[in-house]
Amino acid sequence: MTALNYRHIIMVGPPGSGKGTQAAILAEKLQITTISAGELLRAEARTGSELGKQIAAKIDFGKMVPPEIIVRAMLQEVAKPENGTGYIMDGFPRSMDQVGLFEEAISKEPYNNQNLQPDLVLLLQVPDEYIYDRILGRSQCAKCGEMYHEKFKTPKVFGVCDHCGGKEFTKRADDTYETVVSRLRTYRSVTAPIIPYYEEKGLLKCIDGTGPISVVSEKIRKVVGY
């Protein structure tokens, strides 16, 4: 199968493995949409609604948001007409519960006529020492959300966002050592079981996620074939 045939892609990997960055690069190459479960949930959390407060209470301590909420949000997004050319789902599904709920939903009305079944699952494999380094060193522009890292991606002009010119940078509330430990534990116990599931379905391809962004992108290019 060539890249032209891959239109519904799931990006899997531990926190800090670079899923979001690589999903955005791949989506641009394939001209399809990136859908980040984390960004969708954080956006709702920022609204301050009752639902948003419930989500924030989970996210801020590295806990899992209830699968029904996540699946509903992702379904609404992938089913939008503007996303009809395809998707890369970043950070979803994160549990077998989410896998089951998503597969059940896309097989029924009104989604069953949209052919939303995933056809490729990319697993970014990164050792723990890389994960701690990546997460604890990252920040984002408070104005536009552009991501940076103190080692791997610094602004071209110190203290000024390349994208919007903003001069204020923040760190995510869950980017702490204690939370990373919790998130890795959760990943191994809750998310890792989806890997053999997709492998048995013949959808899984593994990528060495270590190294600079451009190097990892090239590894993905070779596997996907674009």
Image: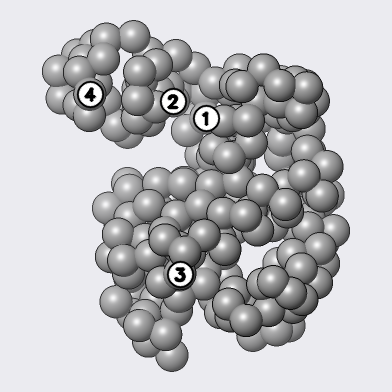
Helix, strand or loop under label 4: loop
Q: Are marks 1 and 2 in contact (CB under 8 Å)?
A: yes
Give the vertical position of 87 relative to 138 (above or below).
below
Horizontal side of residue 21 vs 60, given as left or right? left
- Residue at x-position 82% and y-position 67%: 100
Which residue, given by chain and number where applicable, does mark 3 sit on? Answer: 84
Which residue, given by chain and number where applicable, does mark 2 sit on? Answer: 138
Give the vertical position of 171 relative to 69 (above or below).
above
Q: Position of residue 206 (x, y in %)?
A: 54, 69
Q: Residues within 10 Å of mark 1 (few under 14, many from 20)?
A: many
Q: Quadrant of the C terminus?
A: bottom left
- Residue at x-position 57% and y-position 63%: 79
Q: Residues within 10 Å of mark 3 (few under 14, many from 20)?
A: some
Which residue, given by chain and number where applicable, does mark 4 sit on? Answer: 164
- Looking at the rendered structure, the kind of residue marked 4 is Cys
Q: Position of residue 64 (x, y in %)?
A: 79, 38
- Looking at the rendered structure, the kind of residue marked 2 is Arg
